[in-house]
Amino acid sequence: MKMKAIHTCIRVYDLEKSIEFYEKALGLKVRERKDYPEDKFSLVYLGDEESGHEIELTYNVGHEPYDLGNGYSHIAYEVEDLEKAHEEHKKMGYKVTELSGLSDSNIPKFYFITDPDGYDIEIVRKK
Ligand SMILES: C[C@@H](O)C(=O)SC[C@H](NC(=O)CC[C@H](N)C(=O)O)C(=O)NCC(=O)O
Ligand code: NI
């Protein structure tokens, strides 16, 4: 059965702060916003122009900060110039890890940047 990944949904505590992060840090664009005042939540979809994949932000009015638990690992984005992206993210003042890689190579392949809720986003060097 042929399927296509269209979005990844995360619940966020501060909607505007999260929109700013995904726009500024990842260059995503708000594609759609749907408000459901009667059900006290909003959905915001931010798209990646190249792949078409979207991050869906779910905002529940009045909800306390989320406990992300220990099951979530990361959502990954790829980039041509890993070192340049790493420097730019550090200059933006975001929490980033050092460049890293796995034991199969001594060339750094990725790093992580953390969003306002604590979700880690992996930035991977494009193959
Ligand atoms: C439109 C489609 O992309 C959705 O993901 S809607 C899924 C729906 N979301 C909500 O009801 C948002 C508010 C709710 N309080 C929540 O925090 O999820 C839904 O079914 N959510 C349940 C879930 O487990 O995702
Ligand atoms: Ni969804």
Image: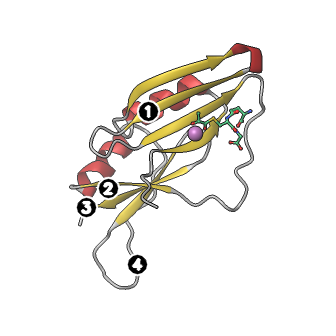
Question: Would you name the residue on which mark 1 appears?
Answer: 46
State the separation of the CA atoms marked 4 and 2: 16 Å
Tell me what residue is drawn at x 26 percent, y 56 percent.
83
Q: Are marks 2 and 3 in contact (CB under 8 Å)?
A: yes
State the separation of the CA atoms marked 1 and 2: 17 Å
Name the N-terminal-most of marks 4 and 3: 4
Residue depth check, mark 4 versus mark 2: number of the one nearer the observer: 2
**Residue 24 in which image quadrant:** top left
Colour convention: secondary structure
Q: What residue type is labelled 4?
A: Leu
Q: What residue type is labelled 2?
A: Glu
Tell me what residue is drawn at x 46 percent, y 58 percent.
97
Check disc 2: other Cα within 10 Å, few if <14, some if 14-19, many if 20+: some
Q: What residue type is labelled 3?
A: Lys
Q: Which amino acid does label 1 sit on?
A: Leu
Residue depth check, mark 1 versus mark 4: number of the one nearer the observer: 1
Tell me what residue is drawn at x 57 percent, y 42 percent.
9
Question: Would you name the residue on which mark 3 appears?
Answer: 126
Q: How many labels does the image show?
A: 4
Query: Quarter of the image containing the C terminus?
Result: bottom left
Question: Would you name the residue on which mark 2 appears?
Answer: 78
- The picture places residue 67, in percent across and down from the top left corner, at 75, 47
Q: Are marks 4 and 2 in contact (CB under 8 Å)?
A: no
State the separation of the CA atoms marked 2 and 3: 5 Å
Question: Would you name the residue on which mark 4 appears?
Answer: 102
- The picture places residue 49, in percent across and down from the top left corner, at 29, 37
Check disc 3: other Cα within 10 Å, few if <14, some if 14-19, many if 20+: few
Q: Is mark 1 on a helix, strand or loop?
A: strand
State the separation of the CA atoms marked 4 and 3: 15 Å
Ligand 1, what quadrant? top right
Q: Of residues 105 and 41, which is closer to you in this image?
A: 41
